[in-house]
Amino acid sequence: MSRPRPALRRALRLGTVLSVAATATVLGAAPAFAHVTAQPGDAAQGGYSVVSLRVPNESDTAGTVRLQVTLPADHPLASVRTTPVAGWTATTTEAPLNPPVQSGERMLDKAVRTVTWTADPGTRIGPGEYLDFPLSLGPLPTGVDELVLPAVQTYDDGEVVSWDQPVNADGSEPERPAPSVALGPVAAPGGDHHAAMAMPGAPQQPAADGADTAGTSDPTARLLAGAGLLVGALGLGAGAGAVLGSRRTAPAETPAPVTTPEREHSGAAR
């Protein structure tokens, strides 16, 4: 068996290196999805928005059976609504406001402080799965650039994980960051906030890690995964191009001469 030509070996090595780089890039996007996050990550001040708490299951053996999110006390929300999630029961607790607080056009003397989703018997977010828990919120605070929503995740083996840490002083992400929504400029007056309050109507089931039940995905993960696929495609293309090039430039083999046996001559002269 003939050994691979040098050009072919170089092409295979190049394709392997680029494929490994693509895999590392895609895997590098995974940690961004491992935290409990608020989706989408931005909204307009003074408006209404559906914010989903995206809860991935980080345990390899246990499942998530409870999630509690705390709403800000210094910026109470007049409207907090849940939507049915199959297999889960949502409850809210209110806290009095003394003194009352103006929120939009309403004066509030109490407001929702926590929202808790509890799994029904036999239901959980299993290993390798995640689930979205939508909330319709509004009017969102004005004069602040962020809405922080600390969350507590409970597993069926008793483990409790608090997602409540603020961003570090140097701007880096802490180990257990609190879910948050960046608040942009005040929404234009006269907008129809009822459309923004529309909630997903279909019951949700836990989705495999990496799937997208809400039609959106983590922007960083999508960007890194796309870059990884592009690098992998370039690697395959470079390898294939080098293989074809080596075939075109390979010298044609010269066929072996065909020998014809000489005729036997009789000993008798003609």
Image (cartoon, helix red, strand yellow):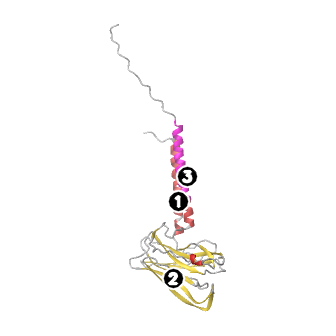
Residue 212 placement (x, y as % from top left): 50, 68
For the residue labelled by badge 3, is the local secondary structure a helix, a strand or a loop?
helix
Q: Is residue 269 left or right of residue 159?
A: left
Q: Which mark is residue 234?
A: 3
Amino acid type, mark 1: Ala
Does 209 sit above or below residue 8?
below
Q: Inspect the magenta stretch and tell me whether residue 239 lies in it.
A: yes
Q: Which mark is residue 24?
A: 1
In this rendering, which labeled residue sits more in front, label 2 or label 3?
2
Q: Residue at x 55, y 76 (%)?
A: 50
Q: Is residue 138 left or right of residue 89?
A: right
Amino acid type, mark 2: Val
Amino acid type, mark 3: Leu
For the residue labelled by badge 1, is the local secondary structure a helix, a strand or a loop?
helix
Q: Is the Cβ of the residue at disc 3 closer than 8 Å to that at disc 1?
A: no
Packing grade of label 2 (10 A; few <14, some 14-19, many >=20) is many
Q: Nearer the viewer, residue 197 or 44?
A: 197
For the residue labelled by badge 2, is the local secondary structure a helix, a strand or a loop?
strand
Q: Earlier in the sequence, mark 2 or mark 3?
A: 2
Residue at the disc numbered 2: 115
Q: Residue furthest top?
A: 270
Tell me, yes or no, if residue 167 can be seen here. no
Q: Residue at x 51, y 45 (%)?
A: 9
Residue 119 placement (x, y as % from top left): 43, 79
In this rendering, which labeled residue sits more in front, label 3 or label 1?
3
Query: Magenta stretch?
Result: 227-250
In this rendering, which labeled residue sits more in front, label 1 or label 2?
2
